[in-house]
Structures are given as structure tokens and as C-alpha cells.
Amino acid sequence: MFFVKSLEHRIDLHPSFFNSEATRYIEQKLFQDVEGTNTGTMMIIAVIGIDEISEPKVAPGTGFAQFNVAYRAVVWRPFRGEVVDGEVSSVVNNGFFVDVGGLSVFVSKAMIPPSMKYNAEDSTPNFSDAEGMTVQRNSQVRLRIKGIRGELGQMFAIGSIREDYLGTLMQ
Amino acid sequence: MAGPPLPATLSRRRPPPTGDEETTTVLRLGEFEGVPCLSLSEAHTIIQKLKTSRSQTDEQGNKPVPMPNTDVYNKTEAYLETFVRFKTEQSASQVEAVSQKLVQEGLITSFERAQLATLCCDTVEEARTLIPSLEGKVSDDELQQTLDDISKMRDFS
């Protein structure tokens, strides 16, 4: 789910940048450091605006000035139990991977309705059932996120389509 | 093992992972409690606006700051292009206005509103199944009315 979140980031400024362009440099550094990153729990997509740049504090021992920049950004954070749409990126015999934005969600066989079976003989491997519902590469599916694990810089998730109103989307 | 006591750790501990955030029958958003939510269409609108405002040189004559070129950003942008249901800014803001009514009356939360605008359910039953926290919150009639208003804005071009 997308949010507009207020966040803080600490930026170190080398003394050679202590001139009239310092504020501009700090803003650019913020954009570079933080935009398009994955913190492990959420993804910061784009910075909307900077609310406040704090007074600088010189770190003892180094000449760097430290600024705390408060800003607002569009972030994306998945939640356990959330229903999301995504595009299938690959199908393997015990499930398939769905790309939901920057997150890859794995739907295992246990989380797929038993009526859907794995077929490897057609042109592309797929899961399909008797009624013609097919999940293959580039299909769009609606799934519920069942679990998320986050490490610094990466997120892993598992999902399910084994419920009412989940599965392939009619286009 | 006995021995001299360890000195107090002076380095900052990594904040412990809370881990119990979920959006099932209850909404536990952790640090996102009370943070404004955006549906896919609204996020798409904001990012398009940022793109245009950042591609122009601003008033102080500073050079434009380019949008990020990371995997996370590119994949998210492609995802939004594919899955937004309300492609124009006008329809997206109309959908927001329509669904915001229920939030203003204190019936649903910001998160549930964004889910309704993103998932575009047809029936009350579908909405309550996909968003379990809606159980017992809004009357069926009001929810169906909101779903119908949202569906009307969809353009099938």
C-alpha cells in the first residue's frame, strides 16, 4: 500500500562544500541517497518535498557537518493480509512468482486451489484448471500476501490465491 | 560463567523488528498508523506530477533533479502504469472525493479507503472478503453506493 510518509535522513557535508551552494547540495544528496531504495520494511519511491533541514552539527574528530533532513516521500509498504495485484514473472512446478512493484511474491502449490494443475507440455509452463483459468508468465493475478520477511535492502514475501475473489484478473 | 561484569553497551541497538503488523480482520499498521494512504491511481498521479515539475528548471535557475533510475523505482513505475484503473488525474481525484466521504463520517480508515479505490470491487460481498477489516463497519447500502460510484469513474478505453 502506498503512503505519504514523513521521514528523516542524516547527511554529512564535507567542509569543501561549505559555501552558498550547500543547501542545494544537501537537497541533491538527499534525492540520491534515499529515492528508489528498499529499507527492508518499505520502499521509498520518490521524495515529494523537504520539510526542514536542521542546524548543522560538526562531528568531533572529523570536519564533517551533520544535517538532519526531514522530508516527505511516497513509500510502498506491503502488509501481511493485504490483497494486491501483480504480474506473473515465472512459473515452476511447485508454484509461481508474482512481481508486485519491486517485490517478488511466491505463491506455492499449497496456496493454489487444488483444481489448478501444473502443465509443462504447452509452449509456456502454466497452472490451469478445468474452467480455463490459466496462470502463466505475464498473467495478471490478484493475491493475498501471507507473510513478509525483510532484511536490509531486500524483502521476500509469500502469497495465496486460494480464496474467493483471488486468482487471475479478467481483462 | 563468572567474571567481571560486561561494560554497558554504548553503541545504539538496531531497532527491533516489530513483526506483528497485519491487515487481516484487524488493522495493525505499526509505524504507519495514521499515515495518509494512497490508492494506486493517486500514487500514479503524484509521481507523474513530480516527474513534470522536476524536469523543468526551477525559479532559482537550478538544474532539474532527475528521477531515480534504480530497480525499485523503475519496477514500481511500470507496475503503476499497468495496474492503475483511473488513468486521468480528474477521474482519480473524483474517486478520492467519493470514497473520502466514508472516511470523513468516521466509518472506515484511510487504509481501507485506499484499498477500495485500488481493488475496484463490484459487490459488497467481494469488498468484505478482500478487505476483512471492513466486517461490521459500514452498512451494505452505503458500501454498495460507494462501490457503484467508484465503478462509474472507470473508463474502459
Image (cartoon, rainbow, N blue to C red):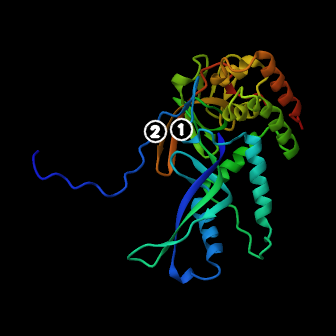
**Placement of B91 over or under A81, stated as above or below:** below
Residue A153 in percent (x, y) is at: 50, 52
Q: Disc 1 marks which amino acid? A: Gly
Q: Which labelled disc corresponds to residue B18?
A: 2
Q: Which chain carries label 2?
A: B
Q: Residue B119 falls in which quadrant of the image? A: top right
- For the point 61% across and 54% down, the residue is B71
In the image, taking residue B134 as reference, residue B81 lies left or right, namely: right
Check contact, mark 1 vs mark 2: CB within 8 A.
Answer: yes
Residue nearest the observer in this picture, A48 or A32? A48
Q: Disc 2 marks which amino acid? A: Thr
Q: Residue furthest left?
A: B2
Q: Which SS class for mark 1?
A: helix
Residue B124 in percent (x, y) is at: 75, 18
Q: Which SS class for mark 2?
A: loop
Q: Which labelled disc corresponds to residue B59?
A: none
Residue A27 in percent (x, y) is at: 64, 68
Circle 1 residue? B30
In the image, taking residue B10 as reference, residue A28 lies left or right, namely: right
